[in-house]
Amino acid sequence: MTPNDDCRRVGPDLPELALGTLSGLERASVLAHVEGCAACRDEVSRLSAVADALLSLAPSLDPTPGFETRLFDRMGLTGPRRRWRRGAIGSLILAGALALSLGLGLGLGGAPEVRSPASAIVATLTSGQTVKGTVYLVPGDPGWLFMSVHGVRAEGLVSCRVRVNGRAETVGSFYLQAGTGSWAYALKVPATEVEAAWLVDSNGDVLAAARLLA
Amino acid sequence: MTELSDEALLAGMAVGDEQAAVAFVRRYQRRAFGLAMSMLGDAQAAEDVAQEALLRVWRHAPVFDARRGSAATWVLAITRNLAVDALRLRRSTPVDPSNLALLRQVSTDSSPDEAVDSWAAADLGLVRALRELPVEQRRALVLAAVYGLTSEAVSRHESIPVGTAKTRIRTALVKLRRALDQPAVEP
């Protein structure tokens, strides 16, 4: 059987492969061909993208009351509300009275008072005048650095270097595919002390850089 | 406050930043709950599914790979798969066509602008393409793509031969893919 005959044989099943609704045996048979056929793989990829997009048409709806509270509890997030829960009733009354006297709302019955991310420092990753991605530096405990890269002329393993208080060091490596990739790193120093970040290839050559301090 | 991208928030979650997790949950809880509710039609079951989906995102954030798709696609796919599992558990109660909220929403008998607010501009092309499908193809596709029904299940659900179900699903999906491949034309 030539590749074209095989493509014609599995072609009618590609939509259901993309939708994930083929039975085990059918799926195995179709996959055996698709794995070795770039054209069919590409078709499945495009059909899958359409199938995924269909899910985005569902309406956004407000969840049931208390949804966030229950979810954050399950996630084990430790916000002020959890600490409040563990505290003594006396402390609660005192805190409530203090809040009222200061004109503050505690929102006791609402969602946990876990804060959204603090202001991030965002810098453009550039090579010459060309934008090659973004670096986010988010303060916190720990603070973290996120590097998002695109359109870089490199493939495979690259490294991230940062300069902290005038001293440069390599803090980690990640893989680029077709010049695209992203990577996160938990900082060991306060985010405000990170002055710059670079992307370097396996030879140590700088592919792109971002200045993080004004 | 700087608006962090979905991918940046997931990266923050991967390194254990609780604030990133909170921001991500607040960004996606309505979409996850909305999809689950559309599929299950029951608020408690939808909450269970949406919570489990967001919990999995939190646990698996370190393995999220932006090169393989967007965060939104990932969250909604996890939600959909969990909702499909929940639907299969209630096998004794087959999906009632009149309860297919998502199908109703994109059908031509609803007002075209009714739900536009909840759709991104990029989704409108998909809605238009869906509405141009013959109703029986649209039903078969939504039953398979969203509700996870196999062609055999669609065949039983719609009282049509399996071959017909397969053809409807295939034709509809390929038509959508072709419609979305078309370059935009100025009115």
Image (spheres, coloured by chain):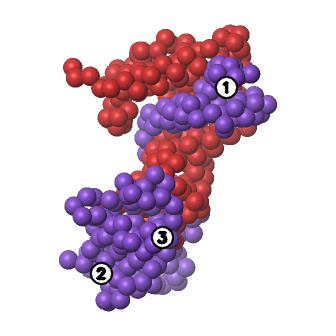
Question: Dot 1 corresponds to which residue?
Answer: A3
Q: Residue at x 40, y 77 (%)?
A: A161
Q: Position of residue A146 (x, y in %)?
A: 41, 67
Question: Dot 2 corresponds to which residue?
Answer: A195
Q: Nearer the viewer, residue B100 or A86?
A: B100
Question: Residue under mark 3: which chain is it in?
Answer: A
Tell which circle, 2 or 1, labels the residue nearer the N-terminal end. Answer: 1
Q: Colour of chain B?
A: red
Inspect the image, locate mark 2, and give the three-letter code of the amino acid beneath it. Glu
Tell which circle, 3 or 2, labels the residue nearer the N-terminal end. Answer: 2
Image quarter where the N terminus of chain A lies is: top right
**Eye-nearest disc, 3 or 2:** 3
Circle 3 residues within 10 Å: few <14, some 14–19, many ≥20: few
> Between marks 3 and 1, how big is the CA–CA gap?
39 Å
Q: Nearer the viewer, residue A68 or B84?
A: B84
Q: Is residue A128 visible?
A: yes
Tell which circle, 3 or 1, labels the residue nearer the N-terminal end. Answer: 1
**Chain purple in the figure, letter:** A
> Between marks 2 and 1, how big is the CA–CA gap?
55 Å
Question: Residue under mark 2: which chain is it in?
Answer: A
Circle 1 residues within 10 Å: few <14, some 14–19, many ≥20: few
Question: Dot 3 corresponds to which residue?
Answer: A202
Q: Residue at x 41, y 22 (%)?
A: B179
Inspect the image, locate mark 3, and give the three-letter code of the amino acid beneath it. Ser
Report whether mark 2 lies on the same chain as mark 1: yes
Name the secondary structure under disc 1. Answer: helix
